[in-house]
Amino acid sequence: MTTNREKDACDLLDADHRAVKKMFKEYEELAQSRARGAAQKKIDLARQICLELTVHAQIEEEIFYPALRQVLKDTDMLDEAEVEHQSAKDLVAQIEAESEPDEKFDAKVKVLGEYIDHHVKEERSEMFTKARSNRKLDLVAMRDELEARKEELIAEHGAMA
């Protein structure tokens, strides 16, 4: 299905969703692997997932959600999304804090993936639909703003590593 519509903020956020889902799937395959080096690859991949989610949540919270709050009457879904973000951030912090993964490391990554999967489904079916139907939002301009902020954050996190 092709449309002539220009890529917008929802497309950018959904591309992040798809990229992270792919990483979670790769992690799951590594978690089942007994191959040499799989443990280190899992740790590296888990850290990459955490970075991607941290940056993604931050651009949503700084730019996307506030813009939606200004134009939507019912903001319950935004409140729920922010609570879901906090739950994910708690797990991200636990995963990032482990220099030597414990026996629950795989479980934490798996549960994080389940949280994110649930969150993404709600964003796609409810939030993106409402955002796209609201004429007051310039989602194409917002895409550019999200993209620029995302690049800044990735550069900042790269400098910290």
Image (cartoon, rainbow, N blue to C red):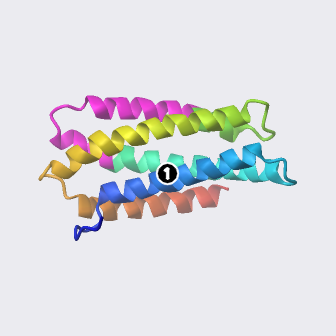
Give the quarter of the figure containing the N terminus. Answer: bottom left
Prevailing SS of the magenta stretch: helix
Vertical position of residue 109 compared to residue 34: above or below: above
**Picture residue at 31% right of the left edge, 57% below the top:** 9
Which image quarter is the C terminus in?
bottom right
Q: Measured from the top left, where is residue 108 in percent x and y?
A: 65, 33
Residue 81 inside the magenta-drawn segment: yes
Residue in front for this viewpoint, 81 or 120: 120
Residue 73 at x, y percent in the picture: 15, 34
Displayed quadrant of residue 102: top right
Queried whether the magenta region covers residue 69, the answer comes back as yes
Give the magenta part as a residue range: 64-90
Q: How far across and how far down the image is residue 139, in percent?
A: 24, 58
Name the residue located 30 percent from the left edge and 42 percent from the top edge. Answer: 125
Q: What residue is pinned by disc 1?
A: 55
Relative to 46, is 78 above or below?
above
In the image, residue 119 lies at what x, y percent?
42, 37
Furthest-left residue in view?
135
Three-letter residue code for mark 1: Val
Q: Which residue occupies 40% across, 64% down?
A: 148
- Asked which secondary structure carries label 1, the reply is helix
Give left or right: position of 139 versus 122.
left
Residue depicted at 37% across the width and 43% down the height:
61
Answer few, some or many: residues within 10 Å of disc 1's Cα (few below 14, many 20 plus, some between 14 and 19). some
Residue placed most toward the observer, 106 or 71: 106
Number of disc labels: 1
Q: Nearer the viewer, residue 141 or 160?
A: 141
Res 76 → quadrant: top left
